[in-house]
Image (cartoon, rainbow, N blue to C red):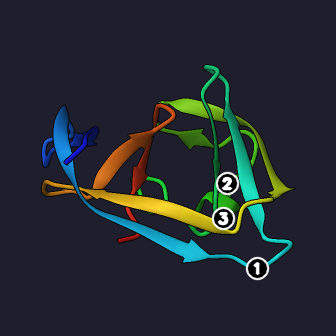
Amino acid sequence: GMLVWTADSDGRRVAAPVVEIGSTEVPSGHLMVHLRLADGRELLASPGHRTADGRPLGSLAAGEKVDGSIVTTSELVPYAGERTYDILPAGATGEYWANGILLSSTL
């Protein structure tokens, strides 16, 4: 399968194949979290998606530390899509980098 960056059990960044892709239908009016970090990384994801350390993205606020940087903005924004998607990389952690931010898979 397609290769993605994942974290191994020692936290090292390694390439691994995607072993599962999932999608979830979302209702009209679904909100997503638009997360911006001080180092320029940003992400649009569902509020319930979790960081690698287990925090739901929807719970993050400005000033909190995430993946070695600081949250500058965390806001709920409308989502025009009909589905959200997630992946599961091979390996011990189920973690992967999305737009440079380490997340835990929901699969």
Tell me which residue sits at (84%, 54%) in the image: 77
Tell me which residue sits at (26%, 58%) in the image: 94
Q: Is residue 102 above or below residue 47?
A: above
Earlier residue among tags 3 and 2: 3
Q: CA distance from mark 3 to mark 1?
A: 14 Å
Looking at numbered disc 2 in the image, what kind of residue is underneath it? Leu
Tell me which residue sits at (76%, 42%) in the image: 62
Rendered location of residue 102, percent (x, y)? 41, 42
Rendered location of residue 39, percent (x, y)? 61, 20
Q: Quadrant of residue 37?
A: top right
Badge 1, how many Cα within 10 Å: few under 14, some, many 20+? few
Element carrying mark 2: loop
Looking at numbered disc 1 in the image, what kind of residue is underneath it? Pro
Q: Which residue is mark 3?
A: 47
User: In the image, which is nearer the foreground, mark 3 or mark 2?
Assistant: 3
User: In the image, which is nearer the foreground, mark 3 or mark 1?
Assistant: 1
Q: CA distance from mark 2 to mark 1?
A: 23 Å
Looking at numbered disc 3 in the image, what kind of residue is underneath it? Pro
Rendered location of residue 76, percent (x, y)? 82, 57
User: In the image, which is nearer the foreground, mark 2 or mark 1?
Assistant: 1
Q: Which residue is mark 2?
A: 60
Front residue (pair 88, 8): 88
Element carrying mark 3: loop
Tell me which residue sits at (55%, 75%) in the image: 24
